[in-house]
Amino acid sequence: MLSSLSIKNYALIEDVHIDLKKSLNIITGETGAGKSIILGALGLIIGNRADLSSLKDNQKKCIIEANFNIAHLHLKPLFEKLDLDYETNTIIRREILASGKSRAFVNDSPVKLQSLQLLGNELIDIHSQQETRSLAESAYQYQIVDSIAGVEVDLKAFKKQDQKIKKLSSQLNQLIEKEAELIRARDYKAFLLSELEEAKLSEIQLEELESEQLQLSNVEAIKEQLSFASNAIQEENYGISEQLNEINNRFQKISDFGEQYSTLQERFNSLRIEAEDLSFEVDKLNTSLEDDPQSLEKINDRLALIYKLQKKHQVESLEELLQIEENLAQEVFETENIQNQISSLEKEISAEQIKLVAFGKTLHKKRKAVLPKLIEKAKVHLQDLAMPNVQFDFHIHFTEKASAFGMDEMEWKFSANKGSSPKPIGKIASGGELSRLTLALKFILAEHKKLPTIIFDEIDTGVSGDVALKIGNMLSAMGNFLQVVSITHLPQIASKGEQHFKVYKQELNARTTTQLKALNKEERITEIAEMLGGDATSTSAIAHAKTLFQ
Protein backbone atom coordinates (compact mmCIF):
# COMPACT_ATOMS: atom_id res chain seq x y z
CA MET A 1 0.00 0.00 0.00
CA LEU A 2 0.97 3.63 -0.51
CA SER A 3 1.71 4.85 3.02
CA SER A 4 2.64 8.43 2.21
CA LEU A 5 3.28 10.81 -0.67
CA SER A 6 5.44 13.91 -0.65
CA ILE A 7 5.50 16.40 -3.57
CA LYS A 8 7.82 19.41 -3.81
CA ASN A 9 8.09 22.01 -6.58
CA TYR A 10 5.86 20.13 -9.03
CA ALA A 11 3.42 21.97 -11.31
CA LEU A 12 1.38 24.21 -8.99
CA ILE A 13 2.43 22.33 -5.86
CA GLU A 14 5.10 23.93 -3.73
CA ASP A 15 5.29 21.44 -0.86
CA VAL A 16 2.63 18.85 0.01
CA HIS A 17 2.76 15.73 2.17
CA ILE A 18 -0.09 13.28 2.78
CA ASP A 19 -0.44 10.03 4.73
CA LEU A 20 -2.94 7.56 3.31
CA LYS A 21 -5.12 4.95 4.99
CA LYS A 22 -5.09 1.25 4.14
CA SER A 23 -8.68 1.27 2.91
CA LEU A 24 -10.65 3.81 0.81
CA ASN A 25 -9.09 7.25 0.41
CA ILE A 26 -11.08 10.03 -1.28
CA ILE A 27 -9.71 13.05 -3.16
CA THR A 28 -12.07 15.85 -4.15
CA GLY A 29 -11.73 19.38 -5.41
CA GLU A 30 -13.12 21.85 -7.87
CA THR A 31 -12.35 21.47 -11.56
CA GLY A 32 -8.89 22.89 -12.19
CA ALA A 33 -7.89 22.77 -8.55
CA GLY A 34 -5.10 20.29 -9.31
CA LYS A 35 -6.41 16.76 -8.87
CA SER A 36 -4.68 15.78 -12.11
CA ILE A 37 -1.41 17.07 -10.66
CA ILE A 38 -1.59 14.37 -7.98
CA LEU A 39 -2.04 11.75 -10.70
CA GLY A 40 0.89 13.22 -12.63
CA ALA A 41 3.12 12.98 -9.57
CA LEU A 42 2.08 9.36 -9.00
CA GLY A 43 2.77 8.68 -12.67
CA LEU A 44 6.36 9.80 -12.16
CA ILE A 45 6.65 7.43 -9.20
CA ILE A 46 5.71 4.46 -11.42
CA GLY A 47 8.11 5.42 -14.20
CA ASN A 48 6.40 7.93 -16.48
CA ARG A 49 8.77 10.26 -18.28
CA ALA A 50 9.54 13.59 -16.65
CA ASP A 51 9.18 17.01 -18.26
CA LEU A 52 11.14 20.13 -17.32
CA SER A 53 7.94 22.15 -17.70
CA SER A 54 6.62 20.29 -14.62
CA LEU A 55 8.83 22.37 -12.32
CA LYS A 56 6.97 25.07 -10.43
CA ASP A 57 10.19 27.00 -9.84
CA ASN A 58 12.72 26.18 -12.55
CA GLN A 59 15.54 27.32 -10.28
CA LYS A 60 14.91 24.43 -7.91
CA LYS A 61 14.64 20.72 -8.36
CA CYS A 62 11.38 18.84 -8.09
CA ILE A 63 11.23 15.93 -5.63
CA ILE A 64 8.43 13.37 -5.46
CA GLU A 65 8.74 10.67 -2.83
CA ALA A 66 6.39 7.79 -2.08
CA ASN A 67 6.59 5.35 0.81
CA PHE A 68 5.12 1.89 0.20
CA ASN A 69 4.40 -0.97 2.57
CA ILE A 70 4.88 -3.98 0.29
CA ALA A 71 5.01 -6.87 2.77
CA HIS A 72 1.86 -8.48 1.29
CA LEU A 73 2.80 -8.21 -2.40
CA HIS A 74 5.53 -10.91 -2.57
CA LEU A 75 7.88 -8.72 -4.57
CA LYS A 76 11.21 -9.99 -3.25
CA PRO A 77 11.96 -12.00 -6.46
CA LEU A 78 11.35 -8.87 -8.55
CA PHE A 79 13.71 -6.85 -6.36
CA GLU A 80 16.36 -9.54 -6.78
CA LYS A 81 15.83 -9.57 -10.55
CA LEU A 82 16.26 -5.77 -10.65
CA ASP A 83 19.29 -6.02 -8.31
CA LEU A 84 17.64 -3.85 -5.66
CA ASP A 85 17.67 -4.08 -1.87
CA TYR A 86 14.32 -5.43 -0.71
CA GLU A 87 12.64 -3.52 2.12
CA THR A 88 9.08 -4.10 3.31
CA ASN A 89 8.86 -0.32 3.65
CA THR A 90 10.15 0.77 0.27
CA ILE A 91 10.75 4.38 -0.71
CA ILE A 92 10.66 5.53 -4.32
CA ARG A 93 11.96 8.99 -5.15
CA ARG A 94 11.94 10.90 -8.43
CA GLU A 95 13.92 14.08 -8.94
CA ILE A 96 13.69 16.52 -11.83
CA LEU A 97 16.70 18.81 -11.81
CA ALA A 98 16.67 22.41 -13.01
CA SER A 99 18.84 21.24 -15.93
CA GLY A 100 15.98 19.00 -17.07
CA LYS A 101 17.72 15.79 -16.08
CA SER A 102 15.57 13.22 -14.25
CA ARG A 103 16.75 10.72 -11.65
CA ALA A 104 14.99 7.84 -9.91
CA PHE A 105 15.82 6.02 -6.68
CA VAL A 106 14.47 2.93 -4.94
CA ASN A 107 15.52 2.72 -1.29
CA ASP A 108 18.21 5.31 -2.14
CA SER A 109 19.66 3.14 -4.93
CA PRO A 110 19.62 4.80 -8.37
CA VAL A 111 17.53 2.90 -10.94
CA LYS A 112 16.83 3.15 -14.64
CA LEU A 113 13.39 4.22 -15.77
CA GLN A 114 12.67 0.77 -17.21
CA SER A 115 13.31 -0.88 -13.83
CA LEU A 116 11.11 1.69 -12.11
CA GLN A 117 8.29 0.97 -14.57
CA LEU A 118 8.51 -2.78 -13.86
CA LEU A 119 8.35 -2.14 -10.13
CA GLY A 120 5.73 0.60 -10.43
CA ASN A 121 3.35 -1.73 -12.26
CA GLU A 122 3.31 -3.92 -9.16
CA LEU A 123 2.72 -1.03 -6.74
CA ILE A 124 0.09 1.26 -8.27
CA ASP A 125 -2.74 0.57 -10.71
CA ILE A 126 -4.12 3.86 -12.06
CA HIS A 127 -7.54 3.67 -13.71
CA SER A 128 -8.71 6.76 -15.52
CA GLN A 129 -11.58 7.02 -17.97
CA GLN A 130 -9.09 6.21 -20.72
CA GLU A 131 -7.85 3.12 -18.89
CA THR A 132 -11.36 1.65 -18.76
CA ARG A 133 -10.80 0.87 -22.43
CA SER A 134 -8.30 -1.77 -21.30
CA LEU A 135 -11.38 -3.93 -20.66
CA ALA A 136 -11.31 -4.73 -24.37
CA GLU A 137 -7.67 -5.83 -24.25
CA SER A 138 -6.84 -9.53 -24.14
CA ALA A 139 -4.21 -9.09 -21.42
CA TYR A 140 -6.74 -7.59 -19.02
CA GLN A 141 -9.41 -10.18 -19.79
CA TYR A 142 -7.01 -13.09 -19.28
CA GLN A 143 -5.81 -11.52 -16.03
CA ILE A 144 -9.35 -11.58 -14.68
CA VAL A 145 -10.12 -15.13 -15.82
CA ASP A 146 -6.75 -16.55 -14.75
CA SER A 147 -7.00 -15.02 -11.28
CA ILE A 148 -10.31 -16.77 -10.70
CA ALA A 149 -9.14 -20.01 -12.35
CA GLY A 150 -5.91 -20.08 -10.31
CA VAL A 151 -3.78 -21.09 -13.28
CA GLU A 152 -0.64 -19.15 -12.44
CA VAL A 153 1.48 -22.33 -12.20
CA ASP A 154 -0.06 -23.76 -15.39
CA LEU A 155 0.51 -20.55 -17.33
CA LYS A 156 4.11 -20.37 -16.11
CA ALA A 157 4.69 -23.97 -17.25
CA PHE A 158 3.14 -23.17 -20.64
CA LYS A 159 5.32 -20.10 -21.13
CA LYS A 160 8.44 -22.00 -20.12
CA GLN A 161 7.62 -24.76 -22.62
CA ASP A 162 6.83 -22.18 -25.31
CA GLN A 163 10.19 -20.50 -24.74
CA LYS A 164 11.90 -23.87 -25.02
CA ILE A 165 10.26 -24.48 -28.38
CA LYS A 166 11.11 -20.97 -29.58
CA LYS A 167 14.74 -21.57 -28.65
CA LEU A 168 14.76 -24.90 -30.52
CA SER A 169 13.00 -23.27 -33.49
CA SER A 170 15.64 -20.56 -33.55
CA GLN A 171 18.33 -23.23 -33.64
CA LEU A 172 16.45 -24.97 -36.46
CA ASN A 173 16.19 -21.76 -38.48
CA GLN A 174 19.90 -21.18 -38.04
CA LEU A 175 20.63 -24.71 -39.27
CA ILE A 176 18.33 -24.27 -42.27
CA GLU A 177 20.00 -20.95 -43.14
CA LYS A 178 23.40 -22.57 -42.71
CA GLU A 179 22.38 -25.48 -44.90
CA ALA A 180 21.22 -23.11 -47.65
CA GLU A 181 24.48 -21.18 -47.39
CA LEU A 182 26.54 -24.36 -47.45
CA ILE A 183 24.61 -25.73 -50.42
CA ARG A 184 25.20 -22.50 -52.33
CA ALA A 185 28.94 -22.76 -51.66
CA ARG A 186 29.22 -26.55 -51.62
CA ASP A 187 30.35 -27.09 -55.21
CA TYR A 188 33.00 -24.41 -55.05
CA LYS A 189 34.26 -25.58 -51.67
CA ALA A 190 34.29 -29.18 -52.86
CA PHE A 191 36.41 -28.07 -55.84
CA LEU A 192 38.81 -26.21 -53.56
CA LEU A 193 39.07 -29.25 -51.30
CA SER A 194 39.71 -31.57 -54.25
CA GLU A 195 42.42 -29.21 -55.50
CA LEU A 196 44.17 -29.24 -52.13
CA GLU A 197 43.79 -32.97 -51.67
CA GLU A 198 45.29 -33.65 -55.11
CA ALA A 199 48.32 -31.57 -54.15
CA LYS A 200 49.02 -34.11 -51.36
CA LEU A 201 50.24 -31.34 -49.12
CA SER A 202 50.69 -33.59 -46.11
CA GLU A 203 53.43 -35.54 -47.98
CA ILE A 204 55.48 -32.44 -48.76
CA GLN A 205 58.55 -31.19 -46.85
CA LEU A 206 58.68 -27.74 -48.36
CA GLU A 207 62.18 -26.81 -47.14
CA GLU A 208 63.68 -30.04 -48.52
CA LEU A 209 61.88 -29.57 -51.83
CA GLU A 210 63.12 -25.99 -52.18
CA SER A 211 66.66 -27.12 -51.31
CA GLU A 212 66.56 -29.88 -53.92
CA GLN A 213 65.28 -27.41 -56.51
CA LEU A 214 68.13 -25.03 -55.73
CA GLN A 215 70.71 -27.80 -56.11
CA LEU A 216 69.32 -29.18 -59.39
CA SER A 217 69.08 -25.67 -60.80
CA ASN A 218 72.82 -25.11 -60.20
CA VAL A 219 74.45 -28.50 -61.06
CA GLU A 220 77.10 -27.11 -63.43
CA ALA A 221 78.22 -24.39 -61.06
CA ILE A 222 78.43 -26.83 -58.16
CA LYS A 223 80.42 -29.43 -60.20
CA GLU A 224 82.83 -26.71 -61.34
CA GLN A 225 83.63 -25.75 -57.79
CA LEU A 226 83.85 -29.34 -56.62
CA SER A 227 86.32 -30.15 -59.42
CA PHE A 228 88.44 -27.15 -58.56
CA ALA A 229 88.51 -28.20 -54.91
CA SER A 230 89.43 -31.81 -55.83
CA ASN A 231 92.30 -30.66 -58.10
CA ALA A 232 93.59 -28.23 -55.50
CA ILE A 233 93.82 -31.03 -52.96
CA GLN A 234 95.11 -33.86 -55.19
CA GLU A 235 97.32 -32.11 -57.83
CA GLU A 236 100.72 -33.88 -58.14
CA ASN A 237 103.65 -31.96 -56.61
CA TYR A 238 101.54 -28.84 -55.94
CA GLY A 239 98.36 -30.26 -54.42
CA ILE A 240 97.44 -29.51 -50.83
CA SER A 241 97.60 -33.19 -49.94
CA GLU A 242 101.11 -33.62 -51.44
CA GLN A 243 102.44 -30.52 -49.71
CA LEU A 244 101.00 -31.55 -46.34
CA ASN A 245 102.58 -35.00 -46.81
CA GLU A 246 106.01 -33.40 -47.52
CA ILE A 247 105.74 -31.15 -44.46
CA ASN A 248 104.68 -34.07 -42.30
CA ASN A 249 107.75 -36.09 -43.46
CA ARG A 250 110.14 -33.25 -42.64
CA PHE A 251 108.71 -32.73 -39.16
CA GLN A 252 108.88 -36.45 -38.57
CA LYS A 253 112.69 -36.20 -38.98
CA ILE A 254 112.95 -33.68 -36.16
CA SER A 255 110.16 -34.99 -33.93
CA ASP A 256 112.72 -36.62 -31.63
CA PHE A 257 114.47 -33.30 -31.02
CA GLY A 258 111.75 -31.97 -28.77
CA GLU A 259 108.12 -32.26 -27.76
CA GLN A 260 107.20 -29.12 -29.61
CA TYR A 261 108.40 -30.67 -32.89
CA SER A 262 106.60 -33.93 -32.32
CA THR A 263 103.37 -32.01 -31.56
CA LEU A 264 103.63 -30.03 -34.77
CA GLN A 265 104.31 -33.24 -36.69
CA GLU A 266 101.09 -34.78 -35.27
CA ARG A 267 99.02 -31.74 -36.22
CA PHE A 268 100.37 -31.72 -39.79
CA ASN A 269 99.65 -35.40 -40.04
CA SER A 270 96.02 -34.75 -38.94
CA LEU A 271 95.71 -32.05 -41.60
CA ARG A 272 97.06 -34.50 -44.21
CA ILE A 273 94.48 -37.10 -43.21
CA GLU A 274 91.63 -34.52 -43.16
CA ALA A 275 92.69 -33.30 -46.63
CA GLU A 276 92.51 -36.82 -47.96
CA ASP A 277 89.02 -37.26 -46.39
CA LEU A 278 87.86 -33.96 -47.89
CA SER A 279 89.18 -35.06 -51.26
CA PHE A 280 87.23 -38.29 -50.99
CA GLU A 281 83.98 -36.48 -50.04
CA VAL A 282 84.38 -33.90 -52.81
CA ASP A 283 84.99 -36.64 -55.40
CA LYS A 284 82.01 -38.59 -54.09
CA LEU A 285 79.71 -35.54 -54.39
CA ASN A 286 81.09 -34.69 -57.80
CA THR A 287 80.51 -38.22 -59.02
CA SER A 288 76.97 -38.46 -57.61
CA LEU A 289 75.86 -35.07 -58.86
CA GLU A 290 74.28 -35.29 -62.25
CA ASP A 291 72.18 -32.96 -64.31
CA ASP A 292 68.53 -34.20 -64.11
CA PRO A 293 66.18 -31.93 -66.09
CA GLN A 294 63.19 -34.22 -65.61
CA SER A 295 63.46 -34.24 -61.79
CA LEU A 296 63.99 -30.49 -61.80
CA GLU A 297 60.89 -30.00 -63.91
CA LYS A 298 58.80 -32.11 -61.55
CA ILE A 299 60.07 -30.18 -58.52
CA ASN A 300 59.44 -26.84 -60.23
CA ASP A 301 55.91 -27.91 -61.08
CA ARG A 302 55.32 -29.08 -57.48
CA LEU A 303 56.59 -25.86 -56.00
CA ALA A 304 54.69 -23.76 -58.52
CA LEU A 305 51.47 -25.50 -57.50
CA ILE A 306 52.14 -24.88 -53.82
CA TYR A 307 52.95 -21.20 -54.41
CA LYS A 308 49.83 -20.86 -56.56
CA LEU A 309 47.65 -22.38 -53.84
CA GLN A 310 49.20 -20.12 -51.20
CA LYS A 311 48.44 -17.07 -53.30
CA LYS A 312 44.93 -18.29 -54.07
CA HIS A 313 44.08 -18.82 -50.42
CA GLN A 314 46.06 -15.75 -49.31
CA VAL A 315 48.39 -17.58 -46.92
CA GLU A 316 52.17 -17.70 -46.61
CA SER A 317 52.90 -21.14 -45.26
CA LEU A 318 52.25 -24.79 -46.01
CA GLU A 319 50.83 -25.21 -42.50
CA GLU A 320 48.14 -22.62 -43.25
CA LEU A 321 47.23 -24.42 -46.46
CA LEU A 322 46.87 -27.66 -44.53
CA GLN A 323 44.57 -25.90 -42.04
CA ILE A 324 42.41 -24.58 -44.88
CA GLU A 325 42.21 -28.09 -46.30
CA GLU A 326 41.06 -29.38 -42.91
CA ASN A 327 38.45 -26.60 -42.58
CA LEU A 328 37.10 -27.24 -46.07
CA ALA A 329 36.85 -30.95 -45.36
CA GLN A 330 34.85 -30.16 -42.21
CA GLU A 331 32.52 -27.76 -44.07
CA VAL A 332 31.90 -30.24 -46.87
CA PHE A 333 31.17 -32.88 -44.23
CA GLU A 334 28.75 -30.49 -42.46
CA THR A 335 26.90 -29.91 -45.71
CA GLU A 336 26.42 -33.63 -46.06
CA ASN A 337 25.58 -34.10 -42.36
CA ILE A 338 23.48 -31.01 -41.61
CA GLN A 339 20.26 -32.50 -42.99
CA ASN A 340 20.49 -35.21 -40.31
CA GLN A 341 20.78 -32.49 -37.67
CA ILE A 342 17.79 -30.65 -39.14
CA SER A 343 15.71 -33.82 -39.18
CA SER A 344 16.66 -34.64 -35.60
CA LEU A 345 15.78 -31.12 -34.39
CA GLU A 346 12.45 -31.17 -36.23
CA LYS A 347 11.54 -34.39 -34.44
CA GLU A 348 12.52 -32.87 -31.07
CA ILE A 349 10.39 -29.77 -31.73
CA SER A 350 7.41 -31.95 -32.68
CA ALA A 351 7.74 -33.86 -29.41
CA GLU A 352 7.99 -30.63 -27.40
CA GLN A 353 5.01 -29.19 -29.30
CA ILE A 354 2.89 -32.13 -28.11
CA LYS A 355 3.81 -31.21 -24.53
CA LEU A 356 2.97 -27.55 -25.20
CA VAL A 357 -0.46 -28.47 -26.55
CA ALA A 358 -1.08 -30.53 -23.39
CA PHE A 359 -0.22 -27.50 -21.23
CA GLY A 360 -2.47 -25.33 -23.42
CA LYS A 361 -5.38 -27.75 -23.06
CA THR A 362 -5.00 -27.74 -19.27
CA LEU A 363 -5.17 -23.93 -19.28
CA HIS A 364 -8.18 -23.96 -21.59
CA LYS A 365 -10.08 -26.49 -19.48
CA LYS A 366 -9.57 -24.54 -16.25
CA ARG A 367 -10.42 -21.19 -17.83
CA LYS A 368 -13.54 -22.48 -19.50
CA ALA A 369 -14.69 -23.98 -16.20
CA VAL A 370 -14.65 -20.60 -14.39
CA LEU A 371 -16.32 -18.46 -17.06
CA PRO A 372 -19.84 -19.20 -15.75
CA LYS A 373 -18.67 -18.29 -12.25
CA LEU A 374 -17.14 -15.03 -13.53
CA ILE A 375 -20.32 -14.12 -15.42
CA GLU A 376 -22.50 -14.85 -12.40
CA LYS A 377 -20.34 -12.74 -10.07
CA ALA A 378 -20.19 -9.88 -12.54
CA LYS A 379 -23.97 -9.92 -12.94
CA VAL A 380 -24.48 -9.77 -9.18
CA HIS A 381 -22.14 -6.81 -8.77
CA LEU A 382 -23.54 -4.94 -11.76
CA GLN A 383 -27.09 -5.49 -10.57
CA ASP A 384 -25.96 -3.91 -7.29
CA LEU A 385 -24.76 -1.02 -9.43
CA ALA A 386 -28.21 -0.48 -10.98
CA MET A 387 -27.70 -2.54 -14.12
CA PRO A 388 -30.43 -5.19 -13.68
CA ASN A 389 -30.64 -6.21 -17.33
CA VAL A 390 -26.95 -6.85 -17.88
CA GLN A 391 -26.08 -9.65 -20.31
CA PHE A 392 -22.71 -11.35 -20.87
CA ASP A 393 -21.51 -13.51 -23.69
CA PHE A 394 -18.01 -14.69 -22.80
CA HIS A 395 -16.56 -17.24 -25.22
CA ILE A 396 -13.25 -19.09 -25.16
CA HIS A 397 -12.14 -21.69 -27.66
CA PHE A 398 -8.96 -23.71 -28.03
CA THR A 399 -6.49 -23.37 -30.90
CA GLU A 400 -3.09 -24.92 -31.30
CA LYS A 401 -1.54 -21.53 -31.98
CA ALA A 402 0.61 -20.37 -29.06
CA SER A 403 0.48 -16.82 -27.72
CA ALA A 404 1.48 -15.04 -24.54
CA PHE A 405 -1.81 -16.23 -23.01
CA GLY A 406 -1.71 -19.90 -24.01
CA MET A 407 -3.58 -21.46 -26.92
CA ASP A 408 -6.95 -19.84 -26.33
CA GLU A 409 -8.90 -17.21 -28.21
CA MET A 410 -11.29 -15.34 -25.97
CA GLU A 411 -14.01 -12.82 -26.76
CA TRP A 412 -16.06 -10.83 -24.27
CA LYS A 413 -19.40 -9.38 -25.27
CA PHE A 414 -21.59 -7.28 -23.04
CA SER A 415 -24.94 -5.53 -23.02
CA ALA A 416 -26.39 -3.35 -20.30
CA ASN A 417 -29.85 -3.00 -21.79
CA LYS A 418 -32.73 -5.41 -22.03
CA GLY A 419 -33.44 -6.55 -25.57
CA SER A 420 -30.01 -5.51 -26.88
CA SER A 421 -27.65 -8.18 -28.11
CA PRO A 422 -24.28 -8.33 -26.37
CA LYS A 423 -21.54 -6.52 -28.29
CA PRO A 424 -17.73 -6.57 -27.97
CA ILE A 425 -16.73 -4.56 -24.92
CA GLY A 426 -14.55 -2.27 -27.04
CA LYS A 427 -17.67 -1.03 -28.83
CA ILE A 428 -19.53 0.04 -25.69
CA ALA A 429 -20.08 3.77 -26.01
CA SER A 430 -21.34 4.65 -22.54
CA GLY A 431 -18.62 5.80 -20.16
CA GLY A 432 -20.89 5.06 -17.21
CA GLU A 433 -21.39 1.46 -18.29
CA LEU A 434 -17.66 0.97 -18.80
CA SER A 435 -16.90 2.52 -15.42
CA ARG A 436 -19.29 0.22 -13.58
CA LEU A 437 -18.09 -2.84 -15.48
CA THR A 438 -14.48 -1.91 -14.67
CA LEU A 439 -15.34 -1.54 -11.01
CA ALA A 440 -17.20 -4.86 -10.87
CA LEU A 441 -14.37 -6.77 -12.55
CA LYS A 442 -11.74 -5.10 -10.37
CA PHE A 443 -13.76 -6.07 -7.33
CA ILE A 444 -13.84 -9.71 -8.50
CA LEU A 445 -10.12 -9.63 -9.26
CA ALA A 446 -9.32 -8.21 -5.84
CA GLU A 447 -11.16 -11.12 -4.21
CA HIS A 448 -8.79 -13.62 -5.83
CA LYS A 449 -5.46 -11.83 -6.11
CA LYS A 450 -3.27 -9.53 -4.07
CA LEU A 451 -3.53 -6.28 -5.97
CA PRO A 452 -1.44 -3.11 -5.70
CA THR A 453 -2.94 0.20 -4.70
CA ILE A 454 -5.78 1.02 -7.10
CA ILE A 455 -6.38 4.63 -8.02
CA PHE A 456 -9.71 5.39 -9.69
CA ASP A 457 -9.72 8.70 -11.53
CA GLU A 458 -13.42 9.63 -11.73
CA ILE A 459 -14.73 6.06 -11.92
CA ASP A 460 -18.10 7.76 -11.45
CA THR A 461 -18.11 9.22 -14.98
CA GLY A 462 -21.61 9.16 -16.45
CA VAL A 463 -23.41 8.19 -13.23
CA SER A 464 -25.22 10.05 -10.48
CA GLY A 465 -27.73 9.71 -7.66
CA ASP A 466 -28.44 6.21 -6.38
CA VAL A 467 -25.94 4.61 -8.80
CA ALA A 468 -23.20 6.84 -7.43
CA LEU A 469 -24.12 5.75 -3.90
CA LYS A 470 -23.88 2.10 -4.93
CA ILE A 471 -20.46 2.71 -6.51
CA GLY A 472 -19.36 4.36 -3.30
CA ASN A 473 -20.50 1.33 -1.30
CA MET A 474 -18.58 -1.02 -3.62
CA LEU A 475 -15.43 1.10 -3.38
CA SER A 476 -15.78 1.04 0.39
CA ALA A 477 -16.18 -2.75 0.34
CA MET A 478 -13.15 -3.07 -1.91
CA GLY A 479 -11.23 -1.02 0.61
CA ASN A 480 -11.70 -3.84 3.14
CA PHE A 481 -9.09 -5.97 1.36
CA LEU A 482 -6.91 -3.51 -0.56
CA GLN A 483 -5.99 0.16 -0.64
CA VAL A 484 -8.19 2.26 -2.91
CA VAL A 485 -7.80 5.92 -3.84
CA SER A 486 -10.76 7.50 -5.62
CA ILE A 487 -10.66 10.92 -7.24
CA THR A 488 -14.31 11.87 -7.50
CA HIS A 489 -16.70 14.75 -8.05
CA LEU A 490 -19.73 12.96 -6.58
CA PRO A 491 -20.67 13.46 -2.92
CA GLN A 492 -22.25 9.99 -2.67
CA ILE A 493 -18.82 8.42 -3.35
CA ALA A 494 -16.83 10.97 -1.36
CA SER A 495 -18.85 10.18 1.76
CA LYS A 496 -17.75 6.51 1.76
CA GLY A 497 -14.04 7.05 2.27
CA GLU A 498 -12.20 6.33 5.49
CA GLN A 499 -10.08 9.36 4.72
CA HIS A 500 -10.88 12.44 2.64
CA PHE A 501 -8.43 14.88 1.02
CA LYS A 502 -9.42 18.14 -0.58
CA VAL A 503 -7.39 19.70 -3.38
CA TYR A 504 -7.69 23.46 -3.64
CA LYS A 505 -5.87 26.48 -5.00
CA GLN A 506 -4.44 29.22 -2.82
CA GLU A 507 -2.83 32.54 -3.68
CA LEU A 508 0.22 33.48 -1.63
CA ASN A 509 2.47 36.41 -2.44
CA ALA A 510 0.80 36.85 -5.83
CA ARG A 511 1.49 33.22 -6.72
CA THR A 512 -1.07 30.46 -7.15
CA THR A 513 -0.32 27.14 -5.48
CA THR A 514 -2.19 23.86 -5.19
CA GLN A 515 -2.75 22.59 -1.65
CA LEU A 516 -3.91 19.22 -0.38
CA LYS A 517 -5.60 18.94 2.97
CA ALA A 518 -6.84 15.97 5.01
CA LEU A 519 -10.35 16.82 6.18
CA ASN A 520 -11.71 16.10 9.64
CA LYS A 521 -15.31 14.98 10.19
CA GLU A 522 -16.82 18.47 10.26
CA GLU A 523 -14.78 19.62 7.27
CA ARG A 524 -15.91 16.55 5.33
CA ILE A 525 -19.56 17.36 6.03
CA THR A 526 -19.00 20.90 4.76
CA GLU A 527 -17.20 19.64 1.65
CA ILE A 528 -19.97 17.13 0.90
CA ALA A 529 -22.58 19.86 1.36
CA GLU A 530 -20.77 22.03 -1.17
CA MET A 531 -20.51 19.09 -3.59
CA LEU A 532 -24.28 18.57 -3.30
CA GLY A 533 -24.61 22.00 -4.88
CA GLY A 534 -26.21 23.67 -1.94
CA ASP A 535 -25.14 26.37 0.48
CA ALA A 536 -22.64 24.67 2.76
CA THR A 537 -23.84 26.86 5.63
CA SER A 538 -27.53 25.99 5.24
CA THR A 539 -29.18 23.58 7.61
CA SER A 540 -30.72 21.50 4.81
CA ALA A 541 -27.42 21.08 2.92
CA ILE A 542 -25.63 20.04 6.11
CA ALA A 543 -28.44 17.62 6.99
CA HIS A 544 -28.35 16.10 3.51
CA ALA A 545 -24.57 15.72 3.71
CA LYS A 546 -24.83 13.99 7.10
CA THR A 547 -27.28 11.44 5.75
CA LEU A 548 -24.68 10.28 3.24
CA PHE A 549 -22.38 9.28 6.09
CA GLN A 550 -24.98 7.02 7.64
Image: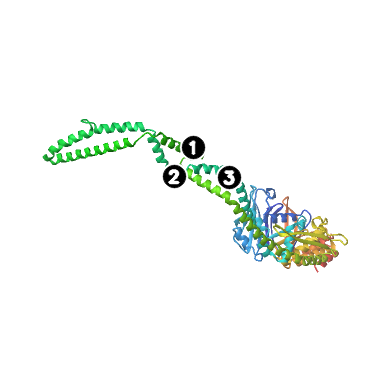
The quarter of the displayed image where residue 235 is located: top left
Residue nearest the viewer, comparing 476 with 216: 216
User: Residue lying furthest left in this view?
Assistant: 257
Which element is circle 1 on?
helix
Q: CA distance from mark 2 to mark 1?
A: 17 Å
Instruction: Identify the residue position indicated by label 2 in the image.
Output: 203
Tell me if residue 50 comes above or below residue 517 in the rendering: above
Query: Which is more N-terminal, label 1 or label 2?
Result: 2
Quarter of the image where the N terminus is located: bottom right
Which image quarter holds the C terminus? Answer: bottom right
In this rendering, which labeled residue sits more in front, label 2 or label 3? 2
The residue pinned by badge 3 equals: 186
**Residue 44 can be seen, yes or no:** yes
Q: Position of residue 283 (x, y in %)?
A: 29, 36
Few, some or many residues within 10 Å of mark 2 (<14, 14–19, 20+) = few
Q: Are marks 2 and 1 in contact (CB under 8 Å)?
A: no
Q: Is residue 472 left or right of residue 452?
A: right
Q: Residue furthest bottom?
A: 550
**Which circle marks residue 308 in the picture?**
1
